[in-house]
Image (cartoon, rainbow, N blue to C red):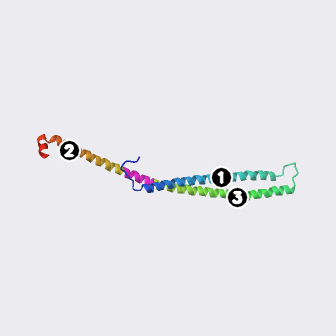
Amino acid sequence: MTQPGFRFSLQRLLAMRLRAEREASIELATAHNAEDAARENAAALEARRAVARDAAQPQPGTATSVADLRRAAFLVEQLDGTLSGAREAVAAAERNVQDHQWRLGERVRDRRVLDRLRERQLETWKTADARAEREVMDGIARTRFMDKETPVSQRSDEQ
């Protein structure tokens, strides 16, 4: 859409804003990946905790030693602590994603402002270019009209 002869004075700034938007987009994707990994880790820990909790429950009709029950209860407590940390990591990852989404929104807004300014300047340039072209064409038409209206004898006297 670049017009020959049109030059946007803030093109460098627009390119920098576009680059910043791309970088923010990449950072957001990275934050989403980290959030997904944190969620998967928390889900895996929850599954391990459920298995350990089921193992800590004595089965009806079977004899389970107190040491086995204590060991299973200790494992469940350890997994509860680890799971709590994993949930905090998920919450931190969610906040990080929200922060990156906000940053990307800011970058997009900054670029769009310059895009709109560029479009306005391009339209102004096109209008001025069309006006100048019309003036040239009108001048040519006037000259041709005057040449047709001027008798041949007067044209040779003027030269």
Classify mark 1: helix, strand or loop: helix
- Asked where in the image residue 96 lies, by quadrant, the reply is bottom right
- Say which residue appears at 17% left-offset and 40% top-offset: 148
The residue singled out by tag 3 in the image is 84
Number of other residues with Cα within 10 Å of mark 1, as a class: few under 14, some 14 to 19, many 20 or more: some
Number of other residues with Cα within 10 Å of mark 2, as a class: few under 14, some 14 to 19, many 20 or more: few
- Say which residue appears at 70% left-offset and 58% top-offset: 84
Q: Which residues are magenta?
A: 112-122
Classify mark 3: helix, strand or loop: helix
Task: Name the N-terminal-most of marks 2 and 3.
Answer: 3
Q: Is residue 79 left or right of residue 115?
A: right
What is the spatial separation of the Cα atoms under label 1 and label 2, in whole angstroms? 76 Å
In x, y percent, where is residue 59? 84, 49
- Say which residue appears at 28% left-offset and 46% top-offset: 134
In x, y percent, where is residue 76? 77, 56
Find out whether the residues at labels 1 and 3 contact each other: C-beta distance under 8 Å: no
Classify mark 2: helix, strand or loop: helix
In x, y percent, where is residue 15? 46, 54
Find out whether the residues at labels 2 and 3 contact each other: C-beta distance under 8 Å: no
Q: Amino acid at mark 2?
A: Thr
Q: Amino acid at mark 3?
A: Ser
Q: Is residue 88 left or right of residue 130?
A: right
The residue singled out by tag 1 in the image is 37
Q: Nearer the viewer, mark 2 or mark 3?
A: 2
Q: Amino acid at mark 1?
A: Ala
Task: Name the N-terminal-most of marks 1 and 2.
Answer: 1
The residue singled out by tag 2 in the image is 143
Q: Nearer the viewer, mark 1 or mark 2?
A: 2
Task: Name the N-terminal-most of marks 1 and 3.
Answer: 1
